[in-house]
Image (spheres, rainbow, N blue to C red):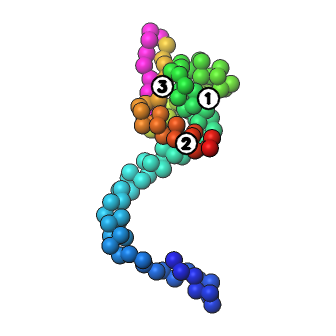
Amino acid sequence: MKINKKTDICEPHTINEKKIKEVKKLLISDDKVKALAETFKALSDPTRTKIIYALFLKELCVCDLAKVINLSISAISHHLRILRNLNLVKFRKEGRIVYYSLDDEHIFNLFNEGLEHILE
């Protein structure tokens, strides 16, 4: 974009048509963009970020998560349901106890990269 000094209005200015076509061809579908945005939206909630961080450190049951984060079991369960629906966390049962962990290495890496970024 180039600014017209007389009117302070942006005027479109294409630098490289070839690059624009290449990028447009590689863009992901709107459905995938929406799913990615939903993932980041879920992670933008401080409570869910705390849950992800706790699970980044160790597999935990709902009761332990509630104690760690200092919230009710009901509130933790609500947030876990959102994270599960987005495939950010998974669970396994051991008898009557349900343990939660990060869904896969991608989530671990995503969180770790974000954490490293803010710690710099």
As measured in the structure, the alpha-carbon distance from the residue carrying label 2 to the one carrying label 1 is 25 Å
Q: Nearer the viewer, residue 118 or 26?
A: 118
Q: Nearer the viewer, residue 30 or 28?
A: 28
Left or right of 85: which side holds 19? left
Left or right of 12: which side holds 28? left
| Quarter of image, res 73 | top right
Residue, disc 1? 75
Q: Residue furthest front?
A: 120
Q: For the residues labelled 2 and 1, say whether their Cβ atoms are less than 8 Å apart.
A: no
Residue 78 is a magenta residue: no
Q: Residue furthest top?
A: 95
Mark 3 lies on a secondary structure that is strand
Q: Residues within 10 Å of mark 1 (few under 14, many from 20)?
A: few
Sequence-first disc among 2 and 1 = 1
Q: For the residues labelled 1 and 3, say whether their Cβ atoms are less than 8 Å apart.
A: no
Sequence-first disc among 3 and 2 = 3
Sequence-first disc among 1 and 3 = 1
Mark closer to the observer (3, 2)? 2
Residue 90 is a magenta residue: yes
Q: Which label sits on residue 26?
A: none
Amino acid type indicated by mark 2: Gly
Residue 37 coordinates in the image, percent (x, y): 48, 50
Residue, disc 3? 101
Q: Which residues are magenta?
A: 88-96
Which residue corresponds to the image point at 49% horizontal and 19% vertical from the top-left? 99
Amino acid type indicated by mark 1: Ala
Which residue corresponds to the image point at 42% horizontal and 19% vertical from the top-left? 92
As measured in the structure, the alpha-carbon distance from the residue carrying label 1 to the one carrying label 3 is 17 Å
